[in-house]
Image (spheres, rainbow, N blue to C red):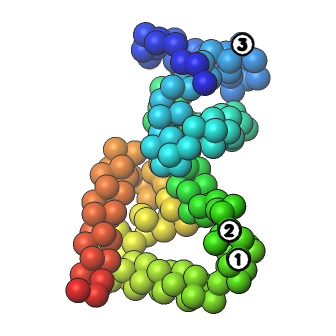
Amino acid sequence: MEFHNRKPLDRQTLVTLVTAAKQGDRQAMDELIQHFQGSVYATVYRRVQNEAEAQELCQDVFMRALAKIGQLANPAAFGGWLRSIAHRMAINRAVRCRPSVSLEAEGIEGPCADGDTPLGEILEQERRDQLKLGLDRLAPMDRDTLVAFYFRGQSLVEMSNHFHTPVGTIKRRLHVARKRLAKELAAMAPA
C-alpha cells in the first residue's frame, strides 16, 4: 500500500469534504480516503501485525465508515471517528482470527483440522469467565463504558449521546476503565 505524505487538512476543508461525502460526493469520499489511509493502516497494522490483512481491513474500515458517514454528527470529528472504527474493527479481526495452521507435518497430524480442541474451548471459556468477573468487579460507570464500546460496538459519538457526556470525557472514561479492568484481571491471575 502506497501512502503519500499529506499536509493535515484544515478544519474548514475537512468539514467541507465530510459534508460533501455525506451527500454522496464520490470525489470528496476519495479525498478523505486518500488523506486518512495512512493513519487507518497504521492503526489496524498495529493490531493485526500482517501487511496483507491490514490492507484488506483498511478497505473494510473505509467501506464501513462511508456506509455510516450519515451518522456522524460533527464533521470536524471525522478523523477520531474513523480511527475508532479502525481500532474496533482491528480488535474484532484480531480476536476472531486465530493464527493460521502450520502446514508442517506436526501441524497436519493434529487431532482437529479446524484448530478447535476441547482444551482450547476450555481455555477460551475460562478467559471469557475471567473477563466477565473482571467486568463485574468494576464500578458501574467503568463497566457500562467498556460494554458499550467493546461489546455493543458503539462509536464515541453514540456513547456521548447515550451517556449525555462530551466525547472527550468518554475517551478518558474508556482509558481509565481499560486500566482498571487490566488491574482487576492481573489481581485475579494465579501467581
Q: Is residue 10 left or right of residue 175?
A: right
Residue at image mark 1:
109
Figure quadrant of the N terminus = top right
Residue 7, can we see it? yes
The kind of residue tagged 3 is Gln
The kind of residue tagged 1 is Glu
**How many marks are shown on the rendered structure?**
3
Residue 69, can we see it? no
The kind of residue tagged 2 is Ala
Viewer-nearest of discs 2 and 3: 2
- The image quadrant of residue 122 is bottom right
Classify 72 as above or below 176.
above
Residue at image mark 3:
27
Tell me how far mark 2 sits from mark 1, CA to CA.
6 Å
Q: Are marks 2 and 1 in contact (CB under 8 Å)?
A: yes
Callout 3: few (<14), some (14-19), or many (20+) C-alpha neighbours within 10 Å? few
Give how far across and how far down residue 89 sits, in percent: 59, 50
Who is closer to the viewer here, 178 or 95? Answer: 95
Q: Which residue is depicted at the point 64% across and 38% down?
A: 52
For label 3, the SS is helix
Q: Which residue is depicted at the point 40% across and 45% down?
A: 167
Tell me how far mark 1 sits from mark 3, CA to CA.
52 Å
Who is closer to the viewer here, 77 or 2? Answer: 2
Q: Which residue is depicted at the point 72% across and 80% down?
A: 112
Residue at image mark 2:
105
Give how far across and how far down residue 151 sits, in percent: 55, 66
